[in-house]
Image: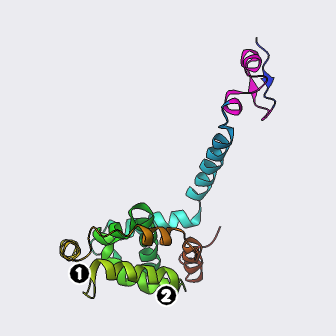
Amino acid sequence: MTIRLPCKSCGESIHPDTAAKNNGLCMPCMGGYRKDIEAGKKRREQERIYDQSAERKHWVALVKRVHDVPNGFEKLMPPEKTYFSVSVLIGEVYNGGFDQFFSNSSGALYAYALDGLFEMEAEESAAQLVKAKQILFGDARISLDKGERLTQMSHSGFGVDLNDLDKAFCEDQENLGARCKRYAIIHSLYEDD
């Protein structure tokens, strides 16, 4: 049985041949990527904890209620509509920018998301949403129908570079996730862990 040795940097046990070859260091420390490994472990642990949280469980149940029944969104209570709309806006913009928000079905939630941002006192984020709407639709009213909305976008600002606006929103100066969580707790949508 080979007795393993501790890495001189991180303390992980390593094979003696590796220690001899790398001046007492494990491969991740020798290669300079130990911090990335540890950060990944920490991120996975945080994700595991979040997956078990009341916030995550509420979100999964809310999405199911919206999508698993006809007119599911319309059956939500007003605070749930606000929470859902702002959360969808955040996810869509983070994933693919304002173009994605407006071109997906979620674009129909524009008015709810805008009202929700104001209700959560996220005026800067609301201003960014309004600016994106203005660029993509001008003064036109946004159609609730996805096909019509895409036609509106193709005639106005679709393809316009919104990267700076997307980036400003994603910098999250107003900590929208925390605002959504606070809103949900205040409105008793779920209890904080």
Name above or below for residue 154 compared with residue 124: above
Give the image location of residue 172, x and y in percent: 55, 71
> Looking at the picture, does residue 87 appear above or below residue 114?
above
The residue that appears at 58% across and 53% down in the rendered structure is 47
Q: Earlier in the sequence, mark 2 or mark 1?
A: 2
Q: Is residue 193 left or right of residue 85?
A: right
Q: Is residue 42 left or right of residue 158?
A: right
Q: Amino acid at mark 1?
A: Ser
Residue at the image point whose x is 41% and y is 67% from the top:
163
Residues 45 and 61: in front is 45
Residue most toward the top?
A: 1
Q: Three-letter amino acid code at disc 2?
A: Phe
Q: Position of residue 97 (x, y in %)?
A: 39, 66
Q: Can residue 74 be seen in this snapshot? A: no
The residue lying at 56 percent from left, 80 percent from top is 183
Highlighted magenta segment, given as a residue range: 9-30
Quadrant in the rendering for residue 101: bottom left
| Residue identified by numbered label 1 | 143
Quarter of the view holding residue 1:
top right
78 over 4 or under it: above or below: below
| Residue closest to the eye, 111 or 81 | 111
Locate residue 174 relative to residue 95 in the image: left or right.
right
Which residue is drawn at the image coordinates 23% and 81% (left, top)?
143
Say which quadrant the C terminus sits in: bottom right
Q: Residues within 10 Å of mark 2 (few under 14, many from 20)?
A: some
Name the residue nearer the viewer: 31 or 15: 31
Residue 137: tell me if it is visible. Answer: yes
The answer to which of 107 and 45 lies nearer the viewer is 107
Helix, strand or loop at mark 1? loop
Q: Which residue is mark 2?
A: 118
